[in-house]
Image (spheres, rainbow, N blue to C red):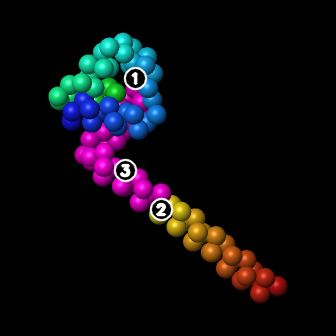
């Protein structure tokens, strides 16, 4: 993974470079150096994931574009589930009224 790709993923967490540096006990210059690297070692990615409280899978295995698409689909499915739950609740309410 490039430093630029890693920077974009970190940016997606809403954590600033300064905050990440603080959490890792590093300087912002150290973090900038990582984000400018052509290739970031897995060890550094793991440390960043740990500092952010993220699972390593957040940073590896999926391009930022695919991750964005997956997150969009997940939000759509969650909204669909909420709609279906409301429909089920309404049906259960109808059934309960008919029992009385």
Residue 4 inside the magenta-drawn segment: no
Q: Earlier in the sequence, mark 1 or mark 3?
A: 1
Residue 88, picture quadrant? bottom right
Disc 1 target residue = 17
Q: Disc 2 to disc 1, how far (Cα)?
A: 31 Å
37 on left or right of 27: left
Disc 3 target residue = 68
Please identify the residue farthest to the right as the structure is shown.
100
Relative to 49, residue 78 above or below: below
Residue 100 visible? The answer is: yes
Percent across and percent down for residue 90 are: 69, 76
Mark 2 crowdedness (10 Å alpha carbons): few <14, some 14-19, many ≥20: few
Residue 26 visible? The answer is: no
Disc 2 target residue = 76
Bounds of the magenta segment: 49-76
Relative to 14, residue 78 above or below: below
Percent across and percent down for residue 76 are: 47, 62
Which quarter of the rendering shows the C terminus? Answer: bottom right
Q: Which residue is drawn at 71% across and 83% down?
A: 95
Q: Residue at x 67, y 79 (%)?
A: 91
């Amino acid at each position: 993974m490039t430093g630029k790709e890693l920077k974009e993923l970190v940016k997606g967490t809403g954590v600033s470079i300064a905050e990440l540096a603080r959490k890792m006990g590093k300087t912002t210059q150290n973090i900038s150096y990582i984000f400018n690297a052509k290739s970031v070692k897995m060890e550094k990615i793991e440390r960043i994931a740990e500092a952010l409280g993220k699972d390593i899978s957040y940073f590896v295995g999926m391009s930022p574009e695919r991750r964005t698409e997956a997150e969009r689909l997940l939000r759509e499915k969650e909204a669909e589930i909420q709609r279906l739950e409301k429909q089920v609740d309404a049906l259960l309410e109808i059934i309960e009224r008919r029992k009385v």
